[in-house]
Structure formats: structure tokens, C-alpha cells
Amino acid sequence: MSAFAEAMRERVRAARAALAAARAAEDAYGAAIAEDELDDALRLALAHGVTTDTGDATNTADGQDGS
């Protein structure tokens, strides 16, 4: 596994954790920021063919695959 791919996966994991924490704290602003970070991380992962923790780089911030 490349260092870039692992860094992308870690960025996605961190963004998902930040989003979950913001939602748990009912922090709308924090959740919006975390969603943007997660969307950006997933977009970059997809653009570079890096799969995320769920095995699919097309996941969105709400955990759905767009189906």
C-alpha cells in the first residue's frame, strides 16, 4: 500500500470521526465543516483510485453510496 493511499484513508477516517463527534454534540457548524472535509477527502480518494474503509471511494458524508 502506498503512503499516499494510507494518508487518504486516514484523512477519510478522521473526517468521519469529526463528523460523528459534531453530530453527537449537535454542533451544526462543526458538522457542516466536517461534511465538507469528508466530501473533499472522498472526492480526492475517488480521483486517485483509493478505496476507503468501506471499500468504496464513492461513499458520501451520510454513508450512502448514491444508489
Image (spheres, helix red, strand yellow):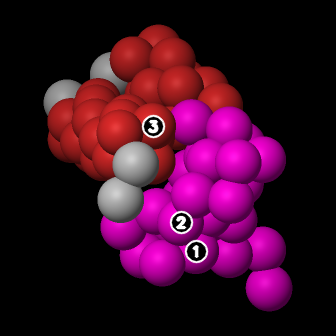
In the picture, the disc for residue 4 is 3
x then y, percent, for residue 25: 19, 30
Residue under the image location 36 percent in, 67 percent down: 53
In the picture, the disc for residue 56 is 1
The residue closer to the viewer here, 40 or 34, is 40
Amino acid carrying label 1: it is Asp
- Mark 3 and mark 2: Cα distance apart in space: 12 Å
Quadrant for the N terminus in the image: bottom left
Amino acid carrying label 2: it is Thr
**Range drawn in magenta:** 41-67
Quadrant for the C terminus in the image: bottom right
Residue under the image location 65 percent in, 31 percent down: 40
Residue under the image location 21 percent in, 36 percent down: 21
| Residue 21 within the magenta-colored segment of the rendering | no
The residue closer to the viewer here, 22 or 67, is 67
Element type at mark 2 = loop
17 left or right, relative to 50: left
Chief SS of the magenta region: loop
